Amino acid sequence: MVWEKQLEGSGGVLVVAFEGWNDAGNASSWAARHLREDLNAEQFATILAEDFYDFSTTRPLVHLAENGRQLDWPETKFSAATDQDILLLEGIEPHLQWRSFVEEITSVVTRLEVSMVITLGSLLTEVPHSRPVMVYGFCEDDETSSRLNLQKSMYEGPTGIIGVLNQAIQEHNIPVVSLWATVPNYVSGATSPKAALALIERLNEILPSPVTSTELEIACAAYERQINELIESDEDMNAYVMDLEYRYDQGEFEADPASGFGDRVERWLHDGANPDEG
C-alpha cells in the first residue's frame, strides 16, 4: 500500500468497483468513474499491482508522453471527495493472493473508520434494453437491509473478489451493500451507460451527497438509439426483444423474491465465478 495523502478517520461511505467478470457492459466501473469525476475526488492511496496480478493476463499499457514512452501498470486506487464523506476504490479484479489483497482494503476501511461499504457489479441477463434497468441489492445487516429495501443473499458456491471483500467487511461489523445492475445479454459487447446510470441513481438513494447524471443520461439516449437500429434489421432479434419487453411489462423481472429474478442473479454469480463448470 502506498499512501499519497494521509487522511484522518471520517466515517465516510466507501464505494467499490472492479473491472472484470463482475463488470458486464463496463457499467459498475463506469458508474464509479462518473462518481469520482463528479465529486472531483482526489487519489490518496494505491495498492500496487506486483503481488496481485498475472501480467501475462492483465498486461501493462505503454503510451507516448512528452518525456518519452511510459508504462501504466494496473493499480487499485483509493480516492476521496473533498469533505471525505464519500470514498472510492477502483481497480481490476486481481488474479493472485486474494486474502492479502482484501486485507489491504480492510486496513484502509478500519483506519478511516468507514461507516458503510457499497460494492457495485453488473451482470448479463435476459432483460430488454428499452425498459428501466433492474438493480438488485444484497445486504446482510438487518437494520441496513430494512432501511434500504434490500435482501439477504441465499447464494452458496464460487464467488469473485466482490464476494470475498463483502465477507471480510462483514466480519469487521461494518454494513456492506452490494448493488448489481442488469445488462441485456444480446448486446454483451457494448458498454452500457444505462446500467451505469441505474447504479448512480440507486447510489443517490444511499450516499450522503447525491451526484449529477446529465452526462450519463445523454449517453443513454445514444445507446438506446444504436441498439434500436441494430435490432430493426434482424427479424429474429426483434422478436426476441419484443418478447422480453412483454415479459418485463408483465412484472417478470421485478427485483423481489417472488419473481425469480433474484435466483437468476445468483445463478449468474455462480456461473461467472466458475466458468469451467459444466
Image (cartoon, rainbow, N blue to C red):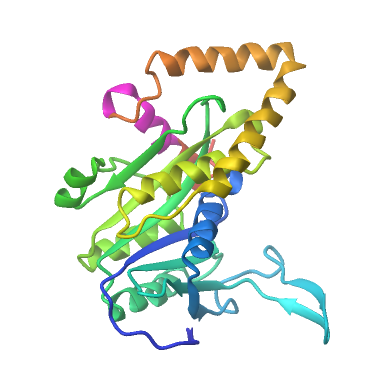
Q: Is residue 256 above or below residue 218?
A: above
Where, by quadrant of the figure, is residue 225 drawn? Answer: top right
- Residue at point 28%, 77% (across, down): 10
Measured as percent of width and height from the top left, residue 51 is found at 56, 78
Q: Is residue 239 left or right of residue 144?
A: right
Give the residues drawn in magenta, as a range: 257-267
Measured as percent of width and height from the top left, residue 246 is found at 48, 12
Q: Is residue 116 left or right of residue 164?
A: left
Which quadrant of the rendered structure holds the C terminus? top right
Q: Is residue 244 above or below residue 185?
A: above
Q: Is residue 108 left or right of residue 70?
A: left
Number of marks in picture: 0
Q: Residue furthest left?
A: 143
- Residue at point 44%, 67% (across, down): 88
Nearer to me, 104 or 100: 104
Q: Is residue 218 magenta?
A: no
Q: Is residue 31 left or right of residue 12?
A: right
- Residue at point 40%, 38% (across, down): 135
Where, by quadrant of the figure, is residue 193 drawn? Answer: top right
Measured as percent of width and height from the top left, residue 31 is found at 51, 53
- Residue at point 72%, 71% (across, down): 60
Nearer to me, 16 or 159: 16
Q: Is residue 228 above or below residue 246?
A: below
Chief secondary structure of the magenta portion: helix
Q: Is residue 264 magenta?
A: yes
The answer to whether residue 192 shows anywhere in this view is no
Nearer to me, 104 or 223: 223
The answer to whether residue 85 shows anywhere in this view is yes
Measured as percent of width and height from the top left, residue 3 is found at 47, 87
